[in-house]
């Protein structure tokens, strides 16, 4: 008489081991990304150069030309560098999220992603671990930028009673942008195609947003179609959530759009990484490396 086979759902000990295995995978994937980041000395510097260039050069040039009136969430007139600071935080999150997409494509070409997805864990959890690791790296880079910006004299109310709301907005925005990068990595077949992603995804997403100018400025200038695109750009709403959180104001429906975009992009990425379709199916047909 054969002994009955126990499943993780039937045996609490096995179920506990499954959770330990999942958390161990999260620790291993996050630790690997942090280790890689610590060895790439120029990565943090390059992540800071772009936003600091805008903060130091462009903000100084437009300080007296482009002022921001007293509109929500501000209670007083503010300078241009204070206005674009949340947008530059968004820039750090955006470029790191897209860089994670590039890393996923590289891992796939080297065969590392294929090995990772064969682990005895749900595929969605493996991808979620990659997404969490990307978010941790994004927050580290944001912290470095905020410190340097404060040293340069840019005032940001990061610390205060609204700190928890700010952290929630930053984490949600980082997860959303990481999920978009994860989804892009399904469709980018080679590293050479990443330049096209920069031109057709990253730059339009950033420049057609409220990162560098408020919506009313776009509408006032008569750029109606740019205004409408910026209104419904998920990146705009992520920045507005961060901006309103910094000043302790209600961000409206922005959190719902950010979280909805996160769930949609992550769900589509999990669907694309299914071995019956996406890069797995392409590999079986000889259409590209796994």
Image (spheres, grey):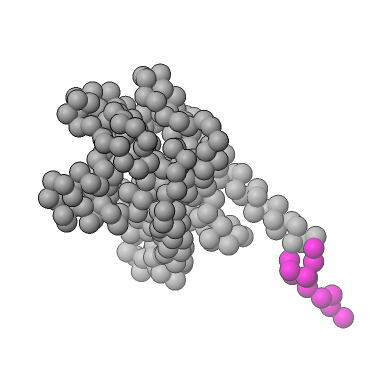
Who's the residue at 22% across and 26% down the image? Answer: 63
- Given residues 241 and 49, the one toward you in this image is 241
- Image quadrant assignment for residue 224: bottom left
| Residue at the extreme right of the image, as rendered | 1
Left or right of residue 225: residue 182: right
Residue at image coords 22%, 56%: 228
Q: Split into 4 quadrants, where in the image is the C terminus?
A: bottom left
- Residue 20 on the magenta segment: no
**Residue 151: percent from left, percent from top:** 40, 18
| Residue positioned 60% across, 48% down in the render | 26
Position of 15 with respect to 215 (left or right) is right
Q: Is 10 within the magenta?
A: yes
In terms of secondary structure, what is the magenta stretch mainly?
Answer: loop
The one of 119 and 65 positioned closer to us in this rendering: 65
Q: Residue furthest left?
A: 222
Of 224 and 289, nearer the camera is 224
**Residue at position x 69%, y 56% from top?**
19
Residue 204, how many percent across, how many down?
A: 23, 49
Q: Which residues are magenta?
A: 1-12
* Vertical position of residue 148 compared to residue 179: above or below: above
Q: Is residue 283 above or below residue 73?
A: below
Would you say residue 42 is visible in this rendering? Answer: no
Could you tell me residue 288's position as x and y percent? 34, 60
Q: What quarter of the picture does the N terminus occupy?
A: bottom right
């Amino acid at each position: 008489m054969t002994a009955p086979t126990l499943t993780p759902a039937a045996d609490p000990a096995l179920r506990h081991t499954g959770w330990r295995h999942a958390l161990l995978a999260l620790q291993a994937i996050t630790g690997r990304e942090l280790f890689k980041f610590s060895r790439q000395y120029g990565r943090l510097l390059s992540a800071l150069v772009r936003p600091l260039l805008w903060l130091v050069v462009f903000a100084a040039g437009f300080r007296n030309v482009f002022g921001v009136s007293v509109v929500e969430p501000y209670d007083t007139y503010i300078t241009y560098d204070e206005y674009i600071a949340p947008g530059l935080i968004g820039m750090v999150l955006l470029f790191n999220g897209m860089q994670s997409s590039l890393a996923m494509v590289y891992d796939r070409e080297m065969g590392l992603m294929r090995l990772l997805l064969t682990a005895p864990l749900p595929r969605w959890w493996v991808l979620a671990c990659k997404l969490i690791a990307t978010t941790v790296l994004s927050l580290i880079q944001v912290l470095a930028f905020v410190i340097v910006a404060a040293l340069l004299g840019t005032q940001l109310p990061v610390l205060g009673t609204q700190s928890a709301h700010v952290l929630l907005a930053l984490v949600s925005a980082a997860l959303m942008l990481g999920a978009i990068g994860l989804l892009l990595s399904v469709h980018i077949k080679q590293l050479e195609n990443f330049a096209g992603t920069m031109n057709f995804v990253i730059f339009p997403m950033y420049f057609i947003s409220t990162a560098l100018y408020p919506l009313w400025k776009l509408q006032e200038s008569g750029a109606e179609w740019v205004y409408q695109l910026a209104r419904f750009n998920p990146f705009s709403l992520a920045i507005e959530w961060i901006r309103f959180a910094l000043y302790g104001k209600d961000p409206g429906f922005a959190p719902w759009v950010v979280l909805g975009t996160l769930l949609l992009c992550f769900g589509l990425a999990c669907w694309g990484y299914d071995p019956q379709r996406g890069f797995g199916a392409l590999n079986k047909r000889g259409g590209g490396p796994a």
